Amino acid sequence: MITTDAAASPTRGAPAAHQTLRILTHLSRQRGPVPASAVAHALDLPRSTVYRLLGVMEEHGFVVHYPEDRRYGIGVAAFELSSGFSRQEPLARLGAPILASLVDKVGESAHLAVLSGRDVVYIVEERAAHRPRLVTDVGVRLPSHITASGRALLAALPPSQLRAVFPNAAAFARRTDDDAYSLRELKAVLTQVRQQGFAGEDGDVTDGFASVAVAVRDHAGWPAAAIAITFPRDHVSRGEWPTLAADLGRYAGELSRRIRGRPQ
């Protein structure tokens, strides 16, 4: 069994890598380029170490040096890393096996959705055996306020952001005459979501089907996605929804952990 300090703490075995990542993270959080001395002071690192690591990162394009201003900022290579993050669709890749395990456990279909403007977009669908195809296929967009996934995501937004998404009655898409929503009505729905810890809908998307959903939070506590289970209404009584949501919350928590988010 390995018991060295380096094995117990990976950062001790690679201090330069640890310091480099701290510097990059610090630069990415600034409003603009900053002096090397400010980086050293903020991270409590020797100036010589900071200058040496900044020089290496500049050579590889991760940092840009502005000589006239004597400041350093994020380089193109760092931007390409973020683009690569988007290209590799980490939420979908990380979420797919989690949804598969969830479906195996509960025996009902599940999906992963993200908020896009006033809509939710479904990025993963895992259909349970012997269950019909749902409208929530990958790539489908639906109004967020009528779906369980959307309500779970909206309930995690601050009030100012919610008002920005739904500034007036015209912002509410209506699929039927029964969808007459207002911001006040939506706030009442979202208050209930926050109180019970999960969102639900019964027949709002597809007649005869209901859904339960919870949000997956990122590192800043914002809703990165929502995981939902959809089932024929007569398969799960409303009294069983909290138990189903508790199972769902554990899987959402695992996805949140994988994206370095906050616990549910």
Image (cartoon, rainbow, N blue to C red):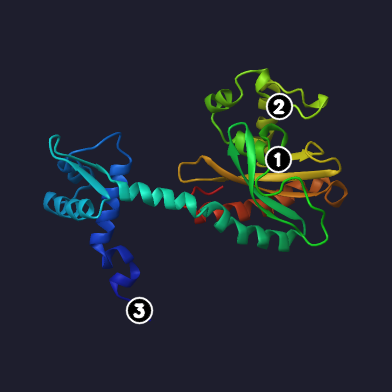
The residue at 11%/52% (across/down) is 48
The residue singled out by tag 3 in the image is 2
The residue at 85%/40% (across/down) is 207
The answer to whether any part of residue 251 appears in the image is yes
Q: Residues within 10 Å of mark 2 (few under 14, many from 20)?
A: some
CA–CA distance between discs 2 and 1? 16 Å
CA–CA distance between discs 2 and 3? 60 Å
Residue 248, horizontal then vertical, whole percent? 67, 52
The answer to whether any part of residue 199 appears in the image is no
Q: What amino acid is labelled 2 in the image?
A: Ala
Q: Residues within 10 Å of mark 1 (few under 14, many from 20)?
A: many
Residue 68, horizontal then vertical, whole percent? 12, 35
CA–CA distance between discs 3 and 1? 48 Å
The residue singled out by tag 2 in the image is 173
The residue at 33%/66% (across/down) is 10
In the image, taking residue 195 as reference, residue 264 lies left or right, namely left
